[in-house]
Amino acid sequence: MNRKGIIIGLIVAVALGGGFLYRFTHLKSGGGSHAEHNEAGGKDEKNGNHEEHKEKKEGHEGQDEHGEAGSVSMTAEMQKQNGVVVELAKKLRMSGAISATGKLEANADRIAHVSPRISGKIVAVKASLGDSVSTGQPLMVIDSVELGEALNRYRQSRTKLALAQSNMERVRNLVEKKIAARKDILQAETEFKTAQAELHTDEERLSLYGFPLPSLTGEEHKRPLLPVRSPISGIITEKHAIVGELADPSKSLYTVADLSSVWVLVDINEKDLAKVRKGQAAVVTVGAFPDLKLKGRITYIADLVNEATRTVKARIEVANPGRKLKPEMFATVELALPADAPPVLAVPEEAFQEVGGKKVLFVAENSTKFESRTVETGRTAGGLIEVLSGLKEGERYVLKGSFLLKSELQKGELGEHGH
């Protein structure tokens, strides 16, 4: 009985030991696979991170090839092969002129508004719109009651003077013959001088009205008509005189303009004021006669700057032979710069490129890196363009080969967008 129990116990022990050994072996095999899997996964992850890092590095290197945004890099050897020339920015004395646009006006110093000096009715019109008239030429004739009254006073004063003179001579003879007293001649002389002064006043009044003094040949009996004359020679540019209408000194009936010279009013930029002065020479051209170049001079520069346009009005007087220049025409004006004009920061035209509709220069940051820099430009003369902002004196810019740098810059931007 004891022997049988021992055998059964051994069998059970062997079975339990086999199960334990199987499980141990299986677990060991599964754990190894899992470890192998983890090891492989870790390796793959590591390789993935490495590839990502490598890709980022390559991408970073690709960015460095063209520099940061708005910059482009080029080795010294490539610059030499492509003819890239770098120049030092400096101030230069620019030749040429300042261009400005303007409008023609009649010379205000040679314009006359014509009206009668006294009221009256227009009875005749002697000149029409566009006529050429000379100084003193009658433009119209008026019938004036006031003129008639002034003429009657003149005639009375002239008669009174003649009587006073005759009386003075008669009294003088009587005094010489000791028939009249000395005081009588003094009174007669006083009356004569008074009559003389009154006649002079009446003559001045008629002269002020523009009426010629009548002669003693019977003109006293004619109806007084007053001719209204042109005070200057020129062209009639306005006419309001109509027969039968009432004219008075407050209303201009004719405008006469001497167009032998005209004014050109131009707007000068505030930045160019230092280069403009009174008396400066100018050349004026108009679209109607592009080959006609007329010389003039600045006669006036305004003291106020227009707030909206930041410009100053200047006036140029120019001769007008043949009256080809007409008021209200548009004109182009070239203002010759004085010989002592200060030098300005200027760059040759070939150095500029256009990027995004703006003028740019490629400025050297170092020997191989160039920045695309937007600049504000001023006037152009003699192949040079004035630089107002964006470039400083002493900086280095690309004089030749800037188009190649522009192409490289745009190529780099396209590559970034494609990536």
Image: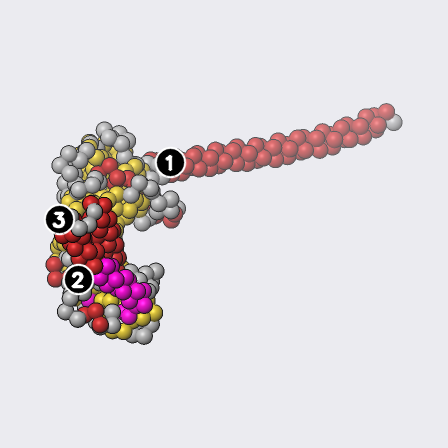
Q: Which mark is residue 176?
A: 3
User: At 22% from the left edge and 49% from the top edge, which residue is drawn?
Assistant: 184
Quadrant in which the N terminus appears: top right
Q: Nearer the viewer, residue 50 or 100?
A: 100
Colour basis = secondary structure
- Residue indicated by mark 1: 60
Q: Nearer the viewer, residue 276 or 112?
A: 112
Quote the CA–CA distance across marks 3 and 2: 51 Å
Name the residue type under label 2: Gly
Q: Nearer the viewer, residue 363 or 92?
A: 92
Mark 1 or mark 3, which is nearer the start of the sequence? 1
Query: Which span of residues is magenta-colored?
Result: 138-160
Name the residue type under label 1: His
Q: Is 338 within the magenta? A: no
- Residue indicated by mark 2: 136
Whether tag 2 and tag 1 are in contact, CB under 8 A, the answer is: no
Residue 399 placement, left or right of 410:
left
Q: Secondary structure at mark 2?
A: loop
